[in-house]
Amino acid sequence: MITQKMDLDVMTLQDLFGVTDTNLHALEQELAVSVVTHEGTAEIRGEDEETVSLAAETLRTLDKMRRVGEPMNEFAVSRALQFVRSGEAAAAVAAMKDVIAYTYSGGPVKCRTVGQRRYVRAMEESTVTIAIGPAGTGKTYLAVAAAVAALKRKEISRIVMCRPAVEAGEKLGFLPGDLQTKVDPYLRPLYDALDELLGPETVGRYMENRTIEIAPLAYMRGRTLKSCCLIADECQNMSLSQHLMILTRLGEGSRMVLTGDVTQIDLPSPADSGLERCAEILENLEGISVVRLGGADVVRHKLVGQIVKAFEKSRVPAGPTKEKNAPPAGRRRRRK
């Protein structure tokens, strides 16, 4: 049996290990070690030196995460372990120190992974940023947070956000109401992010005076956008020609962020998606950054990251699939 001791003050131990030692049990289960605490000392016991050292380094990383304001829970344990295993613990903790913006309630918006920090830096330094990654990596939310921060600093005068009005594998049929009422459900994630960052009243006022504009992609054709930040969301559901259309809206003093998840293409023919091709064409141009996020950057429930990795491993597309033996589009089976 290999043992290693760590000195931690009592308050730190309470924060790290959680209510009824929930976080401690999560670490013990992940690494097959046992941790015994006594008067500010944590003793780690395991079958081999490598595992014990890994557990000790994970505890140190958790303590550093706690000091920069990260909540201590089971998800934090799995993230800290992931950082240590990948050798990115120091860089990840450093990324968590930078505050991008503050929410309406006063909470700080921070990067929580190395990939997210790379994404935010790209938005700060590049005119056009293309972010490709799975669900839960903060692509849209961080883009909105960075745009709101730039607006408050008066670096831009407007925020324009758009996304294609494409149904997510379902046929909704006729929707009642005027055009705005019909398209609002497709734009709801953008409203949600703005409400959290600015508050519903401020968002309403900004939309009335057109400081903030949220619209379907189709409304962007023919426009020139000056001194603004344009965020195009769900770009995996845009064709290559639509990417060209939105990119050429860029005006003087503006910046642009395109986000998308190529594993969730909702177009009738997934091959029509132009996001990956657009990224390949533009990747080496000065002033344009392409950032690729992965399962390690998922900051939702820890199961989301595991689900993403499982799909990546099996290479099964997460988008809608056609029913087997379905008749070709535009044709119906004859009734016998």
Image (spheres, rainbow, N blue to C red):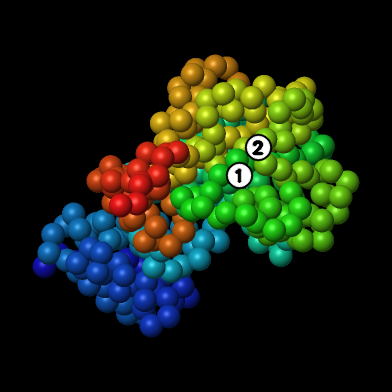
From the viewer's perspective, is residue 24 above or below residue 235?
below
Asked if residue 333 can be seen in this view, the reply is yes
**Residue displayed at 71% across by 65% down:** 105
* Label disc, if present, on residue 165 of the rendered structure: 1
Q: Amino acid at mark 2?
A: Leu
**Residue displayed at 42% across by 76% down:** 18
* Mark 2, residue position: 217
Of residue 265 and residue 107, the one placed in the foreground of this image is 265
Callout 2: SS: helix
**Residue displayed at 84% across by 43% down:** 210
Quadrant into which the N terminus falls:
bottom left
Of residue 21 and residue 232, the one placed in the foreground of this image is 232
Residue farthest right in this picture: 209
> Residue 240 in the image: x percent, y percent?
52, 25
Circle 2 residues within 10 Å: few <14, some 14–19, many ≥20: some
Q: Given contact means CB atoms under 8 Å apart, are the residues at marks 1 and 2 in contact?
A: yes
From the viewer's perspective, is residue 15 above or below residue 122?
below
> Residue 292 in the image: x percent, y percent?
44, 36
**Residue displayed at 19% across by 67% down:** 32
